[in-house]
Amino acid sequence: MQVNPSGSTKERILGAAESLFAQRGFDGASLRQLTSAAGVNLAAVNYHFGSKEKLVEQIFRRRLDALNNSRLQALSLVEGAETTTLEDVLSAFIRPALDLSHDESGSLFMRVLARAFAEHDDTLRQFLSDNYGHVMRQFTAEFARLLPQLTKQELYWRIDLVSGALTHAMSGFGMIQRKSGVSEIEHREETAQHLIRFAVAGLSHP
Amino acid sequence: MQVNPSGSTKERILGAAESLFAQRGFDGASLRQLTSAAGVNLAAVNYHFGSKEKLVEQIFRRRLDALNNSRLQALSLVEGAETTTLEDVLSAFIRPALDLSHDESGSLFMRVLARAFAEHDDTLRQFLSDNYGHVMRQFTAEFARLLPQLTKQELYWRIDLVSGALTHAMSGFGMIQRKSGVSEIEHREETAQHLIRFAVAGLSHP
DNA sequence: CGTATCCTCAAACGATCGTTTGAACCGACC
DNA sequence: GGTCGGTTCAAACGATCGTTTGAGGATACG
């Protein structure tokens, strides 16, 4: 059950927690399973994080900060170029998210996020809006610039549906599964290309 | 806390369970909260359903049987017509799902389903594939007939992304929320139209 | 060496969970 | 009236949960 015996106690807890929360949910994964997997004492979670709930929040911040920084950086690169296409902006929106969905240790943060959506909904929606809403607003402004023929309402709807397709693809819940002969990297690239083409069509149709 | 004091004990439990599972999750909603909300004795769940887990399964069967019957009926109507369009097939796929997402009593089955995906993933995926896979296959065949230019792989990807957008729209997690002045029926119709147009574009682009 | 600080540990706490039990209730049927 | 299957009830069961506690280890500094 023990994993990754290197690193500090805090880091070992964060790693094991992300993996276990993804597998069994926040309620389903107990601190005893978690600390056992991390190879640390049961009391370590409350000592280092204060409570189980604060541990969950810490996990969110770590990943979402990284995601939004990647997105903003990619967007600023796109905006700095001579010509900006819809594909470019969508790539800046989609690729960092797909990169996040599988981290180097193979655990699935997207499942954690999907769970959180299902379990806390309104609380989490508020949290995301407060902390990362400006990123979404920046992308929306760029989409609006590239799609001037759409009303605000129409644009919001389409961005929402693109987000849904992205979330679905990231969570790995769909029919499409990575084939055994294909590497993780290749599958991610294939997913990105399908998603971007699909989103371009869905966003820009008359 | 008590709701809907009419109907049999079994029905009262099913109604309260669907609502509470949607709000708090399967682990988060206890049998004590559930039976208290239903106005029945704590032991009634185990007496009538055997266990909490079997109650969950019962809730799934009830709703998903209804969804898939509606979908198949709508599809057979479309196939019986003189000319079949992509919009028609998508409507048969999407509208029954949107109808399901808000039942007459206002509880949100889709949140239950979204939770279940997050909490059981592989188990639920198998359950859905075993019990309702034939519906998906029938729709896929119809899509393939209407989109002969697409390879199987390409078609599967696009259907998967449409399903993601649909799930997202049903769950109500997105930015788009029903405005207070708009009725549930109107909002559902607006959602259906946006989804169908978006899906047509995403499915049929070259 | 003494001690101060940070951390880890085993053990226990009270609360809540799903489930079981056995008695009580109730309408139907002889 | 008697009894019998189906249902409801209060009470208890053992298990597991998140959290707290206080003793002990480890390391650095005087």
Image (cartoon, coloured by chain):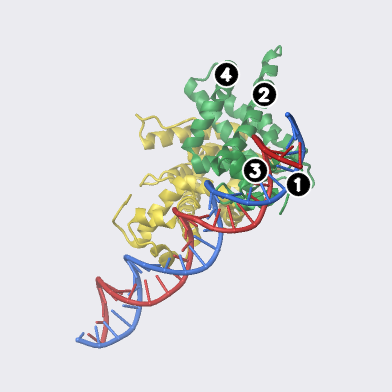
Chain colours: A yellow, B green, C blue, D red
Query: Residue pushed farthest top?
Result: B82
Q: Please, is residue D9 above or below residue A192 in the view?
A: below
Q: Earlier in the sequence, mark 4 or mark 1?
A: 1
Q: Amino acid at mark 4?
A: Leu
Q: Which residue is mark 4?
A: B147
> Nearest the camera: B11 or A24?
B11
In the image, is B65 to the left or to the right of B154? right
Give the number of callouts.
4
Q: Position of residue A117 (x, y in %)?
A: 56, 48
Q: Could one spot residue A173 in this view of the protein?
A: no
Q: Which residue is mark 1?
A: B5
| Chain letter behind tag 1 | B
Q: Do tag 3 and tag 1 residues touch (Cβ < 8 Å)?
A: no
Q: Earlier in the sequence, mark 3 or mark 4?
A: 3
| Chain letter behind tag 4 | B
Q: Amino acid at mark 3?
A: Glu
Q: Please, is residue B197 above or below residue A97 in the view?
A: above
> Mark 4 to mark 1: distance in Å?
51 Å
> Mark 1 to mark 2: distance in Å?
42 Å
> Mark 4 to mark 2: distance in Å?
12 Å
Q: Quadrant of the C terminus of chain A?
A: top right
Q: Which residue is mark 2?
A: B87
Crowding near the residue tagged with mark 1, few <14, some 14–19, many ≥20 C-alpha atoms within 10 Å: few
Q: Identify the residue at horizontal 50%, vertical 52% (top origin).
A: A27
Both labels 4 and 1 in a single chain: yes
> Mark 2 to mark 3: distance in Å?
32 Å
